[in-house]
Amino acid sequence: MFSIQILLRRWLLPVLLGAGLPMAAAWAETVDPALRQQVVEAVLQEDEEQAARIEALAETGSDWAAGVLALWRAGNLQVDRPADGPELLFTLEGAVARRLDTGESFVPVSPKEVATTSKIRKAIKNATDLIAVASPDPKVRAAAINKLGMSQNADYLPVLLARQSKESDAAVQRALREGIALIQLTDEDDVVCLAAIGVLGELRSLGSVDLLQAMTVSDDESEAAKAAAGQALHLIERYQKQVETVGSLFRGLSAGSVLLVVALGLAITFGLMGVINMAHGEMMAVGAYTTYLVQNIFGGGVALSMFGFGLEVPGLNLTGAAYQSYFICAVPASFLMAALVGIALERGVIRFLYKRPLESLLATWGISLILQQLFRLIFGPNNVQVSSPSYLSGSFVISDVVLGYNRVFVIGFAVAIVFLTWLLLTKTSLGLFIRAVMQNRQMAACMGVRTERVNMLTFGFGSGLAGLGGAFLSQLGNVGPNLGQSYIVDSFMTVVVGGVGNLIGTVGSAIGIGMVDQSLQSLTDPSMGKIITLGSIIFFLLWRPGGLFPTRTRSLEG
């Protein structure tokens, strides 16, 4: 209860006031004294007219009044009843009691919580709903209007009709038309009802689907209303399929972006170096677990287990913006940690297995199992949760398509990584050396290129890209020891379909596979979608064994 009270007093009320000002300043300076008195009278007048007085506060459109009513409904409004003075309403700001009628601080003598009844709570709810319709925030207004419309309460209709002439925001105007039409569906006049159905169909109102479906089978509706409801449903359902299709494509684009980042690393280690690295998925898990560790270091720390011995990693106990910045630090840390693990793998195992694909496949597969077991020993066998920072949480809506901030971020960052990788391979000396070693290792060595050093850096860079993919995946789901196994097959398919060693082909195949996979899963089910995608890839490779953009060099053809 204490935490809820603190939340309401220190966060909810300032938000409702909408000013971002200190609470004392908002209560003491920005509120009309007449409004204060109106609120006080509505709260203290315990008679048959109290509910009507409370609902009358909706006409003020005051966010401050809404904040007071919200505190009252939550049981956080108090009254002081001294023996020798008038009753004083007040609220607590920490340890400070502040009068509702003047905004001044005082010391209560005999405080008591202001009680409510079911009738009063209903009146408070109606008043706060109507006050929100006049909120300065368009999103709050639209949400309040949608709520009133879905209630189909005819008492709200005059308020919404009066608001139409005052509203200037296009999105809120649309919400008003929809809300008014939803309420008018219950009108006994067939002309009004048919007009409302036409408006809902014109607006492609997804929220009205259930109501319109009920109308088509109701015995209380006229045949004309049933027919009109059926036509509106047809329009809305067709629009709904379009929304779902665009949503699936967006999810596929974000999934393809993660796959692209992971496959870019594999395109370098497999496509350019010719190494079949079955532990590439575990590089993703390294990046994801690094993100988890950075999050906990910024927070309260984390307890790990090292071969049966407990290890406490202390945290910085940061809060607010400082804590929310953890992901900014986790992205380069994920790349660096995965790159270091990749370099250690290349120096310890891979460098002895160049031009021996079968042995490298078996060795890296064994290493992947070892790394998975290490993850279980250190972090536990269960998934760990990585919370998204505030700037990557939530979503926005465009034409009823919900776009998550985290997925938009992944898409944008994938584009940036592709561009930086292209710059590295085409505009730097390291990129020149990588391409030279790829085309003819012996000739490059004869020209003075330190091929072993190039191999080490190339493998480290490819592993680091996989680590970035793991960091991104931590924002889309849970992190576990088997995280990489879900993507290793898809990554190899992406590289092969795009053309081994061709980065443009990798980009095209990653986005294509991601979007096709998500679209098929939405049309069928996840398992069948995967099967159809895999079968399509097999038939494509039978047609074009070299992929979209086959790489041709003398060393490969010879």
Image (cartoon, helix red, strand yellow):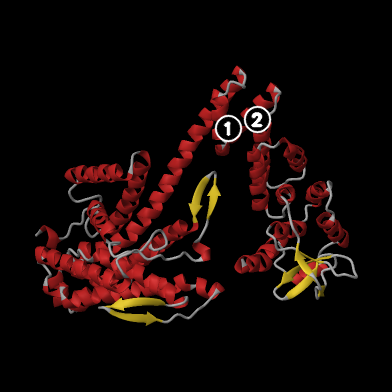
Give coordinates of residue 552: x percent, y percent. Answer: 18, 57
- State the residue in front, 43 or 173: 43
Dot label at residue 373: none
Seen from the viewer's position, the closer of residues 70 and 532 is 70
Number of on-image labels: 2
User: Circle 1 sits in a helix, a strand or a loop, which is it?
Assistant: helix
Q: Quick check: marks 1 and 2 in contact, CB under 8 Å?
A: yes
The C terminus is located in which quarter? bottom left
Judged from this view, the residue extending furthest toward the front is 83
Residue at left offset 84%, top offset 49%: 47
Residue at numbered disc 2: 185
Give residue 230's quadrant in the image. Answer: top right
Q: Amino acid at mark 2?
A: Leu
State the image quarter where residue 410 is shown: bottom left
Q: Secondary structure at mark 2?
A: loop
Q: Nearer the viewer, residue 531 or 373?
A: 373
- Vertical relation: 59 (above or below) 406: above
Residue corresponding to mark 1:
211
Left-right relation of 214 to 502? right
View extreme (top): residue: 223
- Position of residue 38 measured from the top left corner of the image (x, y, whole percent): 85, 56
Question: Quick check: can you spot residue 424?
Answer: no
Q: CA distance from mark 1 to mark 2?
A: 9 Å
Whole-percent x, y for residue 384 in the image: 37, 66
Q: Compared to 311, does 495 lie above or below?
A: above
Image spot of residue 41 (x, y percent):
85, 56
Amino acid found under the numbered disc labelled 1? Leu
Q: Quadrant of the N terminus?
A: bottom right
Q: Is residue 327 visible?
A: yes
Name the residue located 68 percent from the left edge and 41 percent from the top edge: 176
